[in-house]
Amino acid sequence: MGRSMARHLMAAGHPLVVYTRTRAKAEELVAAGARWAGTPGEAAAEAGVVITMVGYPHDVEQVYGNPDGIFETARPGTLLIDMTTSSPALARALHTEAKSRGLAMLDAPVSGGDIGAREARLSIMVGGDPEDFARAMPIFEKMGKTIVHQGPAGSGQYCKLCNQIAIAGGMLAVCESLAFATKMGLNPSTVLESITGGAAGSWGLSNLAPRVIRGDYSPGFFVKHFVKDMRIAIESARHSGLHLPGLELAERLYARLIAEGGENFGTQALYKLYEAHPRNPEGR
């Protein structure tokens, strides 16, 4: 996703300095004119806007807080935008630290997967100060279509967790619908023709169910990252005194999928549990 997003910024005329932990992943951008940096801090040192998108909250902490990180080199006034799906508490802490250093900071996770990133149709959910959101808007518009300021620091992350909760329940429904259709002797493709245009219609049913039917479990969004997001949401809900049994069920199922080697599949690979364990996908 990050590579596609960066390409859109380059196409709009923005000069880029890029850093990834695996340089090979940036070679396409470097070949197109981006400049390579050896550390996150080097990438941030001369930038007016710094965008990060990494895997896990601990990666975010390292990219910003390590001795060779962004906080150590970013110039006062620099706008920092973390587009990782991460912890709301961490987003608030980073915002506070950034402000103490004369920096601006937004949390801006996205939804839309690999397709949305390629087509610049991402939904971008933003937390932070309104004036910083306004400053970032021309950048966001190059990468997404639905761009909403959700509130103060951490609000973008909370909104993304709402998104993930809805996806988790939706993927259960998609996979169970396909499993039921197959078990009843129906053609799943013709079933989709009938139900995607009705009240059951959803993004997952239209975009991911056909992949399941084709046996295509390649990641638009990795299972391992989805489980990370669900666990952050469950922890946040419990901390607030809210019980989300549907989300907890989805997390258990995806955790089993990881245990069976599915961490690098796309989220639609949940269906594999229903194929392999039709009587007991939970493993209980």
Image: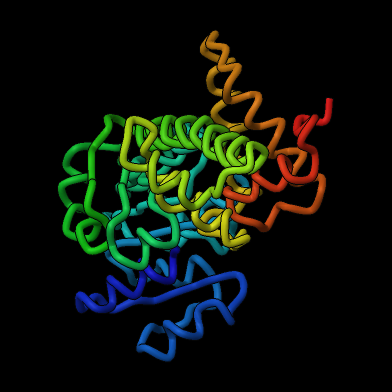
Up-down: is 22 above or below 77? Answer: below
Q: Is residue 227 visible?
A: no
Give how far across and how far down residue 13 sits, in percent.
Answer: 20, 79
Up-down: is 265 above or below 200? Answer: below
Q: Quarter holding the C terminus? A: top right
Q: Quarter holding the N terminus? A: bottom left
Residue 94 falls in image quadrant: top left
Query: As drawn, is 186 to the left or to the right of 104?
Result: right
Give how far across and how far down residue 37 sits, in percent.
Answer: 49, 78
Query: As drawn, is 230 to the left or to the right of 199?
Result: right
The residue positioned farthest toward the bottom in the image shown: 31
Residue at point 58%, 79% (across, down)? 23
The number of discs equals: 0
Give how far across and how far down residue 205 sits, in percent.
Answer: 44, 44
Residue at point 50%, 49% (across, down)? 209
Residue at point 57%, 41% (across, down)? 178
Residue at point 58%, 82% (across, down)? 24
Query: As drawn, is 20 to the left or to the right of 276?
Result: left
Residues 53 and 191: in front is 191
